[in-house]
Image (cartoon, rainbow, N blue to C red):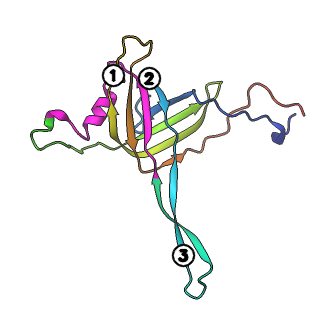
Amino acid sequence: MVDSKTKRRDPFKNFRFRVKFGDGTDYIAGVSKVSGFKRSTEVIKHRSGGDPSTSFKLPGRTEYDPITLERGVTTDKIFEQWANRVWSYQNSGSGLESSLKDFRRDIIVDAFNEAGQKVLSYQVFNCWVSEYQPVSDFDANANAVAIQHIRLENEGWVREDLPEPPETGFEDPA
């Protein structure tokens, strides 16, 4: 029997993931890239009036960087429909540039190990499309897939606490 301290823990591959909306719908087809998640907390320096040589640091406001989703261009309109909830050219002359009804959505990013078991899951809250690129450059001399992307502003994310997947493959005998 192998002690849990001696189990080999390989890092997860970054290409086994899927993205879905937080309302329980199916996974969004064809997402090929998700930018990394990043949060930054401002540092507030505080100094006591009687001790001018020492300062203390306190946490301030926390900001969450936008997340970018990319996928190959298909006839699926889910990115375009979501981006149009923030701004639509069809309404631009009528004074209804923004119909902000339901423009925020939660998304879930799931990562899987080589055995296909979900090992990481992040829920990203109140996302809305701040940038939409329906197609990448068209180039007759290139041999590439047309890519579309959206940039999602968000109000934070949490990691779901998943049970540890059963070990598969190599275990260190030491």
| Outermost residue toward the left in this view | 94
In x, y percent, where is residue 155? 42, 51
Cα distance, mark 1 to mark 2?
A: 10 Å
Label 1 crowd (10 A; few <14 / some 14-19 / many >=20): few
- The answer to if 84 sits in the magenta stretch is yes
Residue 30: numbered disc: 2
Q: Are marks 1 and 2 in contact (CB under 8 Å)?
A: yes
Q: Residue furthest bottom?
A: 50
- Disc nearest the viewer among 2 and 3: 3
Give the quadrant of the N terminus.
Answer: top right
Which one is in front in this view, the residue at disc 3 or the one at disc 1? 3
Q: Which residue is mark 3?
A: 46
How many numbered dots are placed on residues in this image?
3
Pinpoint residue 124: horizontal percent, then vertical percent.
Answer: 46, 44
Instruction: Give the residue type at disc 3.
Output: His
**Res. 54 visible in picture:** yes
Q: Is residue 161 left or right of residue 146?
A: right
Q: Which residues are magenta?
A: 64-90
